[in-house]
């Protein structure tokens, strides 16, 4: 019986105890794929693309004839009709005049613009270009999102490594503080020196809290970019980052720029803008040309005052018609000239936009390249500085134990080591980030 009670208590505690699940860890590729599917800005750009596609369908349908059907039905009341007198209804003389009578009409009509200076066909081309521009806008947005994700991802990696460095520094500070307490007890250190060691340990704890806060903030920004709003803990996979990744050959700036000029969507979009302005110029000039259209119709009508049957009336009153019209512009109050001039100005604007995009692209790549080269050199120097600072601090620690140096010299050596470690970390991750950005512009992929 006692065993059963213990088993029941254990089972109950298992059921009511909170279950702990580890947070999902996201790789860089998973973050990018998720953002490309769920980011709201990107989804809006896709909607704009679909809207532009509808404009294409509309302009294509405008090349075909229009067809419409109409019918009208009227009931009239004439309280005092004149007897013995005929009345004309729908083009026919009706001998019977009723107080209440009904008229019905039925018709089908069609209109077709045969030629209007090719403006209708050029409208289709213009809408196709607009759809392509919308697609390029979407691709540009996707690229920008991928860049932001990569930058935040590397910031998270750097912050995680910085926390490790600060924790290692805290361990050293705790050991120094404990060693100082032992020295105070035997009278080999003053309490003022011990207070400095305690202050350093507290400062390291503060640095850890600050670094962890920065890490959480970068994760929050990444979650926002991924449009994740749930309360589930968010974390990323910490890939292995070797020194070789920071020491690899930096891609040549001119080669990356040459590729980006041919492949980047913002450059293609600016070039396409020039093409659309050329088409707009043609369409504006076409306003000076005649417009030719044709029309056709079929109509019939009925009346209650006719003695003929309803079907006979439809047949007897049936009428077919057709015609064409030509509109020739003579004076249009300068609207055509204004349209042509504005289209030409738009083309100049797109030319400037293309030049601006090319300049911006080169500046962006040059910045990535300079940052990669500079931080790579910093990393090489920082590695040597870290090794030297570590050796120096080890020697200072030994001398401190032997009371050959004071607390100030020990803390100076420890601060120099911490600064060297942080410089090495920062230059390492900045080098990796900027090299990856150059490769992204060169290959169009982030790995």
Image (cartoon, helix red, strand yellow):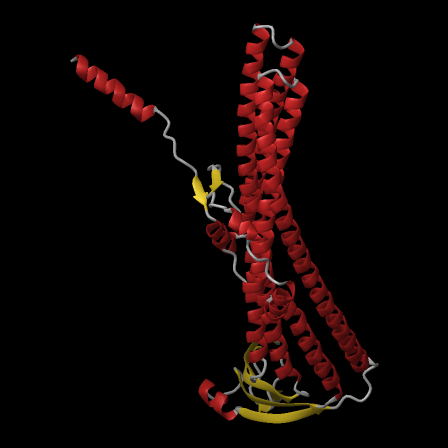
Vertical order, 230 against 349 (above or below): above
**Which of the 4 quarters of the picture holds residue 300?**
bottom right
Q: Is residue 295 left or right of residue 10?
A: right
Q: Where is residue 7 in the image (x, y as percent from the top left)?
A: 22, 19
Q: Residue at x 48, y 54 (%)?
A: 33
Is there any visible trace of residue 188 in the rendered image? yes
Q: In this view, does 4 lie to the left or right of 341?
A: left
Q: Where is residue 416 in the image (x, y as percent from the top left)?
A: 65, 31
**Which of the 4 quarters of the picture holds residue 268?**
bottom right
Q: Residue at x 59, y 58 (%)?
A: 250
Vertical order, 4 against 440 (above or below): above
Q: Which of 57 and 274 is in front in this view?
A: 274
Q: Nearer the viewer, residue 333 or 81?
A: 333
Q: Nearer the viewer, residue 11 or 92?
A: 11
Is there any visible trace of residue 148 in the rendered image? no
The extreme left residue here reads 1
Q: Which residue is drawn at 49% across and 50% down?
A: 28
């Amino acid at each position: 019986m006692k065993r059963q009670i213990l088993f029941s208590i254990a089972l109950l505690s298992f059921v009511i105890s909170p279950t702990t699940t580890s947070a999902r860890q996201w790789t860089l590729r998973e973050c990018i794929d998720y953002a490309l599917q769920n980011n709201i800005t990107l989804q809006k750009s896709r909607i704009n693309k679909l809207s532009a596609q509808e404009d294409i369908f509309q302009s294509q349908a405008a090349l075909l004839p229009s067809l419409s059907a109409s019918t009208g039905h009227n009931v009239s009341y004439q309280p005092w009709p004149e007897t013995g007198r005929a009345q004309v209804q729908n083009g026919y003389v009706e001998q019977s005049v009723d107080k209440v009578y009904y008229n019905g009409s039925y018709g089908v009509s069609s209109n077709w613009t045969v030629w209007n200076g090719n403006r209708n066909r050029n409208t289709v081309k213009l809408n196709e270009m607009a759809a392509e521009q919308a697609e390029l806008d979407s691709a540009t947005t996707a690229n920008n999102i991928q860049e932001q994700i990569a930058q935040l991802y590397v910031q998270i990696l750097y912050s995680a490594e910085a926390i490790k460095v600060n924790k290692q520094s805290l361990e050293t500070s705790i050991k120094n503080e404990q060693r100082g307490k032992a020295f105070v007890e035997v009278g080999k250190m003053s309490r003022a020196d011990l207070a400095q060691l305690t202050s350093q340990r507290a400062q390291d704890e503060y640095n850890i809290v600050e670094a962890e806060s920065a890490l959480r903030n970068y994760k929050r920004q990444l979650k926002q970019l991924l449009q994740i709003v749930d309360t589930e803990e968010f974390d990323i996979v910490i890939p292995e980052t070797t020194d070789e990744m920071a020491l690899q050959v930096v891609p040549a700036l001119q080669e990356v720029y040459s590729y980006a000029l041919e492949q980047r969507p913002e450059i293609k979009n600016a070039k396409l803008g020039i093409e659309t302005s050329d088409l707009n110029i043609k369409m504006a000039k076409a306003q000076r040309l005649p417009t030719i259209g044709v029309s056709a119709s079929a109509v019939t009508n009925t009346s209650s005052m006719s003695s003929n049957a309803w079907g006979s009336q439809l047949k007897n009153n049936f009428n077919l018609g057709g015609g064409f019209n030509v509109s020739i512009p003579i004076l249009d109050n300068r609207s055509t000239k204004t349209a042509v001039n504005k289209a030409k100005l738009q083309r100049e604007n797109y030319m400037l936009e293309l030049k601006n995009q090319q300049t911006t692209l080169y500046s962006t790549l040059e910045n990535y390249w300079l940052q990669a080269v500079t931080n790579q050199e910093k990393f090489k120097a920082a590695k040597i500085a870290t090794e030297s600072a570590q050796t120096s601090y080890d020697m200072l620690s030994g001398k401190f134990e032997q009371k050959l140096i004071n607390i100030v010299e020990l803390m100076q050596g420890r601060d120099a080591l911490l600064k060297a470690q942080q410089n090495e970390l920062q230059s390492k991750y900045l080098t990796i980030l900027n090299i990856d950005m150059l490769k992204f512009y060169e290959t169009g992929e982030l790995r």
